[in-house]
Image (tube, rainbow, N blue to C red):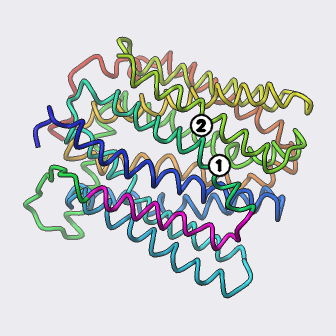
Amino acid sequence: MEKKNWFQTYMYIWIGQFVSLLTSSAVNFAVIVWLSLTHKSAEVLALAGIAGLLPQALIGPFVGVLIDRWDRKKVMIFADAFIALCTLMMTFILQEAAVGLSLIYLLLTCRSIGAAFHAPAMQAIAPLMVPEDKLLRVSGINQMLQSVSSIAGPALGTLAITYFSIAQVLYLDVIGAAVAIVSLFFVTIPHLKVESKLSFGQAWGDLKQGMQAIYHNRGLSLLFLYAMIATFCVMPIAIMFPLLTIDHFNGGKWEMSVIEIIWGVGMLVGGGLLGAFKVNFSKVIMINTMHIVLGLTFAFSGWFPSTWFIPFVIVTGIGGVSMSLFSASFMTTIQEEVAPQMLGRVFSLYFSLAILPSVIGLLFTGMIADVIGVANAFVIAGLLMMIVGVLSFFTPAVMRLGKKVPHNEAV
């Protein structure tokens, strides 16, 4: 497939992924609402977050080796099918028994295993199909799709959990995965063939090459480090957003929906800006600035008094814009700095390296909420993120990213 015809082909991917993202967003939010209103426990939400993240962190690096060797289209199809099968099995289990936390954690773990294959494969196909000067625009459109699903998903999830049981709500995930799989049948994705056979030694060698692709690019390795620190701050806070809405701002399920929807609106605006306009300045400047802006929104969210729900909604929307701009710029920077044949490994390593610190942060979420309070946790995390953004501006190797020809393609 010639890259000049990429847009028409990518349309099928976008359609399938949008439906899948929408249904997944609805199911995820329905589960969060159910857990928040049923247990009102930061510890329960933290364990749910760990169940959804830890499998990706543990198997991610080795998954990347396989993604770079296998057909990435088939990887995405089988990953979606695995998620759909696990979810379908859970719907039957939950219909026959009382809804227990252990079953919810098991479902999130299974979905995490599928996502460990799907997310890096999805990010790794773009450079194979899209001209390099269009990568940021594609990332912007991807952010728009995630944003629309973030807007409609919580509303759909709230509506579903209001009228249906949690077991019935899970069927949405099955439908979304099925649509995503069907859409991929209409797409041709180039496959980079690897001649050497896969063995344990070869797999370890491939993994080392992925690590070296990061390590030998000092700017990229430091960018990864700063992203890990930011994720360590963000993840516990993201888990505690429903608790801040309920406990601090005295909200309920619809207020939680408003916060999720306005976050999605912000991400839609950010993705729309990237999709509509060509960015002529350094993407690293965008990344660093968005660290600072996102940190400010967290700090203000915790600092606002309980009667300031509307200002909380506004800064949440600004946070959504900054998260969208950061994510698209960060992913595009990786795609431009790393050779296509190693993108699966590098993206898997990034997801794992970013997740592991966040899992550690989640382990302390209950203690954080009980000892210093949810609102204070938002303020502290926001200040730490702002410090990360400022440090990035004063790191020359990071600021040089994108200004030179990638030198790691021969690694």
User: Marks 2 and 1: CB-CB under 8 Å?
Assistant: yes
Amino acid type for the residue under numbered disc 1 = Pro
The residue lying toward the viewer, choosing from 396 and 258, is: 258
Q: Nearer the viewer, residue 214 or 376?
A: 376
Local packing at callout 2 (Cα closer than 10 Å; few below 14, some 14-19, many 20+) is many
C-alpha distance separating marks 2 and 1:
9 Å
- Measured as percent of width and height from the top left, residue 287 is found at 48, 24
Residue 327 x, y percent position in the rendering? 47, 34
Q: Is residue 300 above or below residue 15?
A: above
Please tell me whether the stretch drawn in magenta is mainly helix, strand or loop.
helix
Q: What are the residue bounds of the magenta stretch?
A: 163-184
Can you tell which quarter of the image residue 102 is in? bottom right
Residue 73: image quadrant is bottom left
Q: Could you tell me which residue is drawn at 45 percent across and 70 percent down?
A: 84
What residue sits right under mark 2 in the picture? Answer: 264
Would you say residue 178 sits in the magenta stretch? yes
Mark identifier at residue 172: none
**Three-letter amino acid code at the position of disc 2:** Gly
**Direction from residue 381 to residue 146 in the image, left or right:** left
Measuring 57% from the left and 26% from the top, which residue is drawn there? 322
Q: Is residue 345 magenta?
A: no
Q: Where is residue 299 in the image (x, y as percent from the top left)?
A: 75, 28
Q: Name the residue under label 1.
A: 154
First along the sequence among labels 2 and 1: 1
Give the quadrant of the N terminus: top left
